[in-house]
Image (tube, rainbow, N blue to C red):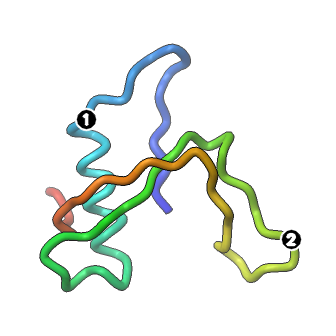
């Protein structure tokens, strides 16, 4: 999971979303793929699954982006 904090009523720039998605893909099982699909949504649409192990969540109202898994410096 990657969390990006933005101020209320502000729009997230596309390049920030792409960098965050690339970072999430890099630290996932998709690390060695040429391109990886990453889903994203607002925090209010992410819910913890009752009784599930740590880090498991359910997501609604998600969108997806196709990115190259990489870490930016």
Identity of the residue drawn at 28% across and 73% down: 26
Q: In which quarter of the image is the C terminus?
A: bottom left
- Using the image, determine if residue 61 lies above or below residue 50: above
Q: Height in image: 42 above or below 27?
A: above
Horizontal side of 38 relative to 61 (left or right) equals left
**Picture coordinates of residue 22, whole percent (x, y):** 25, 60
Residue at the (52%, 45%) spot, across then down: 41
In this rendering, the count of numbered labels is 2
Spot occupied by residue 12 in the image (x, y as percentages of width and height):
36, 29
Q: Name the residue under label 2.
A: 50
- Drawn side of residue 55 relative to residue 70, left or right: right
Residue bearing mark 1: 14
In the picture, measured across the screen, residue 61 lies left or right of residue 40, that is right
Circle 1: is it few (<14), some (14-19), or many (20+) Cα within 10 Å?
few
Query: What residue appears at the point 86 percent right and 71 percent down from the top-left corner?
Result: 50
Q: What element carries label 2?
A: loop
| Secondary element type, mark 1 | helix
* 2 and 1 marks in contact (CB < 8 Å): no
Name the spot of residue 29 as percent of width and height, x first.
Answer: 36, 85
Q: Where 65 sits versus 41, above or below?
A: below
Q: In which quarter of the image is residue 10?
A: top left
Q: How crowded is mark 2: few (under 14 residues within 10 Å), some or many (20 or more)?
A: few
- Residue 11, relative to residue 31: is it above or below? above
Q: Which of marks 2 and 1 is nearer the N terminus?
A: 1
Q: Nearer the viewer, residue 65 or 29?
A: 65
In the image shown, does 5 or 21 lie closer to the viewer?
21
């Amino acid at each position: 999971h990657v969390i990006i904090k933005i101020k209320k009523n502000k729009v997230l720039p596309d390049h920030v979303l792409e960098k965050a998605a690339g970072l999430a893909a890099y630290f996932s099982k998709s690390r060695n793929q040429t391109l990886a699909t990453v889903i994203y949504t607002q925090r209010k649409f992410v819910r913890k699954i009752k009784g599930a192990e740590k880090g498991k969540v359910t997501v609604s109202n998600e969108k997806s982006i196709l990115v190259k898994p990489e870490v930016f410096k």
